[in-house]
Image (cartoon, rainbow, N blue to C red):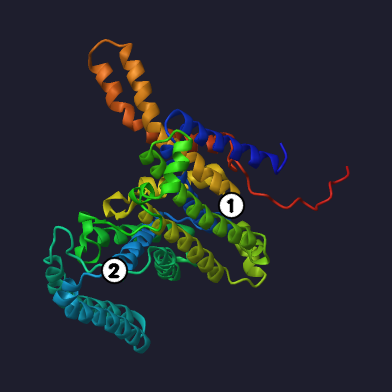
Amino acid sequence: MSRIARPLALYAVMASLIVAVGFIQSWTVALSITNLALISAIMTLGVNIQWGYGGLFNAGIVGFAALGGVAAVLVAMPPVTDSWIAGGTNLGLAGLAILGTIGAAVFVRGRTHGRRRTWATLFTILAGYIVMRIFLDPASDAIEAINPSIQGYLGGLGLPVLVAWPVGGLFAAGAAYLVGKVALGLRADYLAIATLGIAEIILAILKNENWLTRGVKNVTGIPRPIPSERTFQTIGWVSELGHSFGLSPAMTAAIANRLGYALLFLLVLGTILWLAERALNSPWGRMMRAIRDNQDAAEAMGKDVTRRHLQVFVLGSAVVGIAGAMLVTLDGQFTPTAYTPLRYTFVIWVMVILGGSGNNWGAVLGGFVVWYTWVMAEPIGNHLAAALADLLPAGWLRSHILDSAPHLRPFLMGMILLLCLRFAPRGLIPERRAPSTRKPEVN
């Protein structure tokens, strides 16, 4: 199959599967799958920029996605005035203590040398942390005591929720810059360990610092860019259009709401995909792939490998942060406990590998295929388990089969990854490589 026909055929099959869900189950389910697949595809583009362009392994995707979610809370939610009055002063002093600690640590490192520098820096950071906690602890207690059932946090800036998407990218990019400055330039496994560690630190902060994002109490009621289903029911022409297709007003409103999200997400995905393709086919993209394929040769040619790795790592993390903010916007709530490495790291890596690392169109396709499988595995597993259990008499085996049905989802993810590595190691849509100009040898 030709280079163009293969992707078109694969995308046509994927579209047919989603349309089949619309006919068999409902169009709201099909559009819900599409919306989450679009967000997953944006995340895979970010990881593909890091791995497919620069060969950087990010083991902490979940942390950068969570930072995008935090942006949605801090930007779109209205501020809680009483919380700012109760703990704003001490919180500001804690922030000044953090800035003072950073400045003092930089000053100490510039004035000391050798082993004394290490110990002096550690002592400065420890002293600054103690001072910061002196102000932060009473501030957090006062803030969390303000109407804790529905508030108990600072709130946000009350800006339009779409502003949170680029801010989420900036949050993730900032964290990636700090990690990259420390870990890049060392061995490749250091970056994997650093990203894994920073992701766990981010999740621990989000789950325990209630004054920031309510912790495990969750933040609900985040504004949405698309009108709600109830609003769509009040629009006359929407209900009339649905009635012409034999749909009830409630079903029409649900489809209109999800379709609006799909169009908005498709616009973002198309923009990022266009930019990623331009970058990949530019001299910068060719340089990044040259560094990925042979780092030593690139260094010998005068390329600053560490700087370029930092660029691509920050760019990829920013895209993941944008997708994280979009996901919270779609859900309308921020749930720190929902960020698990299985869903936001392992599954995203399966998407990239299955689609084809180094190929942006392959990464997008991988996001759709794996998310579709992830969603459909549960009803298919329950159906298969029930059908098999009906053939067995009552007993431990029948109960075991019924109880094992929910585990089909991670089992399928593992099987997809193994089969892909065995039969299609370069993915469904492999990376396009330049044809070799080497002449065949004549014997």
Quarter-wise, where is residue 406 in the image? top left
Query: Residue 398: x and y, percent?
Result: 27, 17
Q: Earlier in the sequence, mark 2 or mark 1?
A: 2
Proximity of marks 2 and 1: CB atoms separated by less than 8 Å: no
Q: Give whichever of 108, 73 is nearer the camera.
A: 73
Quarter-wise, where is residue 299 in the image? bottom right
Query: In this figure, which residue is indicated by the disc labeled 1?
Result: 360
Q: Nearer the viewer, mark 2 or mark 1?
A: 2
Residue that appears at 68% across and 66% down? 283
> Residue 156: which disc?
2
Q: Secondary structure at mark 1?
A: helix
Query: Residue 62: x and y, percent?
Result: 37, 54
Q: Give whichever of 138, 274 is nearer the camera.
A: 274
Q: Is residue 249 visible?
A: yes
Q: Is residue 116 above or below residue 438?
A: below
Residue that appears at 59% across and 72% down? 304
Query: Which amino acid lies under the numbered mark 1 shown in the image of this protein?
Result: Asn
Query: Residue 378: x and y, percent?
Result: 37, 32
Quarter-wise, where is residue 26 in the image? top left
Task: Give the distance between the C-alpha atoms of the residues marked 2 and 1, in whole angstroms.
Answer: 35 Å
Query: Which amino acid lies under the numbered mark 2 shown in the image of this protein?
Result: Gly
Most extreme residue toward the bottom is 111
167 left or right, relative to 336:
right
